[in-house]
Image (cartoon, rainbow, N blue to C red):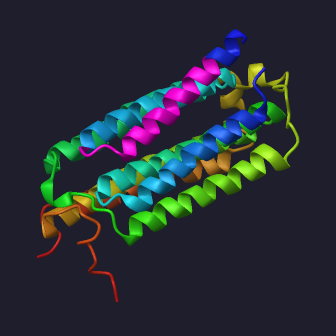
Amino acid sequence: MIPLNYYLLLSAFLFCVGVLGVLIRRNAIIVFMCIELMLNSVNLTLIAFSSFLGDPTGQMLVFFVMTVAAAEAAVGLAIIIALFRTKRSVNIDEINILKW
Amino acid sequence: MTFEQVVFFFLAAVALFSAVMMIFQRSPVNSALFLILNLFCLGGLYLTLSAQFIAMVQVLVYAGAIMVLFLFVIMLLNLGDDKHLREHLGVRTYFGIGFSIALVVELLYIFGLRSPAGAAQQSPSAAEMGTVEYVGKVLFTKFLFPFEVTSLLLLAAIVGVVILAKKKLIE
């Protein structure tokens, strides 16, 4: 049997890779994919706990996280398309009209 | 090593490798393909946790629907190897790497050293918990209200996307 800690450590590493991507990349679409990666690593934690504790609540929560992720992906990509129409770029350093 | 351990370590290694490759790829298409690989590995890990239905949903919804949407947008915006998007090492990059390493160390400390071995066994009731029947039963009794609220969220997302992606956003 694989102990619970292994799953938690794997999901922690995946989450940190996602954080690193959000912090260092400039391409808005890749930043967005890193957010998906972080959501997925948390899903892994939820399912691991659900399976080890014998409680279905974690699995239900994963369903709602997936719904939110799907809605978030659709809206976020629409925002990126709208931004690209006005600025002709997806570089997050150039998207600064909300600053100040 | 038992068969379970081999499967777990293989999937974990591929998941970590594809995640790291995803953030260090220059072209967004390659990043998206590595993310798809990562999502498949996570689906496999859900299977090892005996959550069969969620593993299927993961492959269908994430690797199928969401990533196709990503690839469509990348294709639509024609973001092949963009020259002016070149990453350059700056203060922000070093700060990002530093913060991520700090986060890794903290999480290692919590999960690896501080906590006891944790639950070493999966719960015996976990085997039947992942089936469609069980998931449906819980979802439509105990979690009926959140499930209905989800429809509202999806409706809001649909309306928002149609308005945002319209041709004439600014007249």
Q: Is residue A33 visible?
A: yes
Residue at 27 percent of width and 58 percent of height: B87
* Residue B101 drawn in magenta: no
Q: How many marks?
A: 0
> How would you classify the magenta stretch by its main secondary structure?
helix
**Placement of A22 over or under A40, stated as above or below:** below
Q: Please identify the quadrant where the C terminus of chain A is shown.
A: bottom left
Q: Nearer the viewer, residue B101 or B125?
A: B101
Q: Nearer the viewer, residue B1 or B136?
A: B1
Residue at 31 percent of width and 43 percent of height: B25
- Left or right of A84 on screen, residue B130: right
- The residue range painted magenta reads B7-27
Q: Position of residue B38 (x, y in %)?
A: 46, 33
Q: Nearer the viewer, residue B132 or A78?
A: A78
Q: Please identify the quadrant where the N terminus of chain A is shown.
A: top right
Residue at 40 percent of width and 64 percent of height: B93
**Placement of B15 over or under B147, stated as above or below:** above
* Residue B16 drawn in magenta: yes
- Left or right of B103 on screen, residue A75: left
Q: Position of residue A93 (x, y in %)?
A: 28, 70
**Placement of B78 over or under A49, stated as above or below:** below
Q: Residue furthest right?
A: B116
Q: Position of residue B98 (x, y in %)?
A: 53, 62
Q: Residue furthest top?
A: B3
- Left or right of B78 on screen, residue B73: right
Residue at 62 percent of width and 27 percent of height: B46
Q: Position of residue B47 (x, y in %)?
A: 62, 22
Q: Is residue B140 visible?
A: no
**Placement of B45 over or under A19, stated as above or below:** above
